[in-house]
Amino acid sequence: MDNVKNDRYFAGKIREDLDFIAKHMSRVDAEEFAQNDLLQDSMMFRLIQISENARKLSEEYRRQHPSIPFLAMYGLRNRIVHDYGNVDLSIVFATLKNDIPALLTLMTEALDE
């Protein structure tokens, strides 16, 4: 079995993480998110994974999908990793609820091409 880690592989991993977030956040409100440390950690871990896998995509892949906000994906990871104790949970929550479903749609469309 060929275990090649190429753009399709990394894009698939991103989509898996986006899908996980969308499913687990669909019924969570801001108050519940703010009070649930385990959920916060899980979601931030997934955001970091998304960023790490996005960095592994080729420049060609990123050029072919200009509607996908790769720079924003990298930037969020850096905020979480380098300033973990001071992460603004309201921004993370808004990202999880508003941006992730749209990004999931974009990644799914890119993979279906």
Image (cartoon, helix red, strand yellow):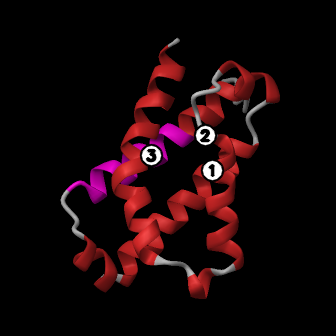
**Mark 2 and mark 3: span between their CA atoms?**
14 Å
Q: Mark 2, mark 3: which one is toward the viewer? A: 2
Q: Which mark is residue 72?
A: 1
- Toward the viewer: 2 or 81? 81
Residue bounds of the magenta highlight: 14-26
Q: Which residue is mark 2?
A: 69
Q: Is residue 17 found inside the magenta-colored segment of the image?
A: yes
- Residue 49 location, quadrant: bottom right
Identify the residue shown where x is 67% and y is 45%.
Answer: 53
Looking at the picture, how far across and down is residue 23, in whole percent? 28, 50
**Mark 1 and mark 2: span between their CA atoms?**
5 Å
Q: Which residue is mark 3?
A: 18
**Mark 3 and mark 1: span between their CA atoms?**
14 Å
Identify the residue shown where x is 55% and y is 79%.
Answer: 87
Q: Amino acid at mark 3?
A: Leu
Q: Mark 3, mark 1: which one is toward the viewer? A: 1
In terms of secondary structure, where does tag 3 sit? helix
Identify the residue shown where x is 63% and y is 25%.
Answer: 8
Q: Amino acid at mark 1?
A: Ala
Q: Are marks 1 and 2 in contact (CB under 8 Å)?
A: yes
Q: Is residue 108 above or below residue 40?
A: above
- Toward the viewer: 17 or 60? 60
In terms of secondary structure, where does tag 2 sit? loop
Q: State the residue lying farthest toward the right.
A: 59
* Crowd rating for badge 3 (residues with CA inside 10 Å; few <14, some 14–19, many 20+): many
Give the mark, 2 or 3, whose residue is nearer the N terminus. Answer: 3
Give the mark, 3 or 1, whose residue is nearer the N terminus. Answer: 3
In terms of secondary structure, where does tag 1 sit? helix
